[in-house]
Amino acid sequence: MEGSTSILVVDDYEPWRRFVSTTLQKQPKLQVIGEALDGLEAVQKAQQLQPDLILLDIGLPTLNGIEAARRIREVSPKSKILFLSENRTWDIAEEALRTGAGGYVVKSDAAGELLPAVEAVLKGKRFVSASLAGNDLTDHKDEHTANHSRSEVVPPLQPQNVWITRRHEAGFYSDERSFLDDLTQFIGVALKAGNGAIVVATESHRDSLLPRLQALGLDVGAAIDALPTFMLNGMPDPVRFLKLLGNLIATAAKAVKREHTRIAIFGEMCHLLWAQGNAEAAIQVEKLGNELSKIYDIDILCGYSLGSVQGGMDTHILQRIRAEHSAVYSR
């Protein structure tokens, strides 16, 4: 494909490779030309295919991703490398970047960060996941980065007053398929990484999500309709909201049964309020979502189905909603 970027995807988990390929296909100029399941195969295919970009896991069989990256530099020196790993250890991320890689994305952040990371790395910039960007992952002057006067850390778009270590994103969808695709990816990536998830959605969307997750070998617990329980006189009550969501987060974290877990929260609450003509309540819930993200280790995706409401969203309301999020997507 003329003018396209060739990409090699390296990961030993097939559903994850499928997720990555599906995400990349949203950009016509990104072309996956090969896959590898372990470190040695990654080196061999890099030498054979000479891809523009290699998306590389760290915990690979036979040869770990960091050592594979060092060998790839020798056999395919023009290939840029972007690590995709669930490892959040600062020392590991730093060592990975010292191989000359252009970026490091935490897998549970990939639903919102993969495409921005690919774009940044292809432009010669450095990208570090928002959940790691607070650390001093600055420029490392070795033989693989010496040609760059400075590597730039490029986190996703962040509005003021939102902590960079948290994600509170919004997706605006014109069709049902895009809506369900992003919902499946967002929840699926979290569950695959061993994290917890909370879904507050319409019954039809919950029913559509379950078989999609089961097809990935994943499962979700009971759905919860939380909307009526924190509203008071047509507006969200902050105390009720924070208590309710805090309890749900604690329950989800307990169900995971591990010491440190990150909770993914998908919600249609704001969309439903807006669709009912209560845009101000929707905006207040978004603001409360930002408060929630300052307290808990969470990622939030708010879904808006534009095609389901006649007349669409007022421009002023849209701008106010966008301002409350760390990233906004239109599908």
Image: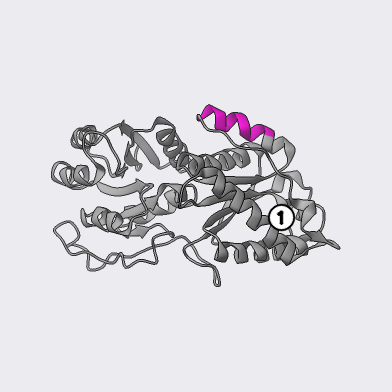
Where does residue 124 sit, x and y in percent of width and height?
29, 58
Secondary structure, mark 1, is helix
From the viewer's perspective, tell me whether residue 117 is left or right of residue 145.
right
Magenta highlight on residue 210:
yes
From the viewer's perspective, tell me whether residue 85 is left or right of residue 191.
left
From the viewer's perspective, tell me whether residue 92 is left or right of residue 259.
left
Q: Residue at x 49, y 45 (%)?
A: 195
Tag 1 residue: 270
Which of the image's four quarters has the N terminus?
A: top left
Q: Residue at x 80, y 52 (%)?
A: 228
Q: Residues within 10 Å of mark 1 (few under 14, many from 20)?
A: many
Where does residue 279 sit, x and y in percent of width and height?
77, 61
In this orientation, does residue 226 appear?
yes
Q: Residue at x 49, y 47 (%)?
A: 111
From the viewer's perspective, tell me whether residue 29 is left or right of residue 140.
right
Where does residue 310 sit, x and y in percent of width and height?
79, 48
Q: Quadrant of residue 8?
A: top left
Q: Residue at x 62, y 36 (%)?
A: 177
Q: Quadrant of residue 320?
A: bottom right
Chain part drawn in magenta: 207-216
- Which residue is at the front of the view, 16 or 100? 16
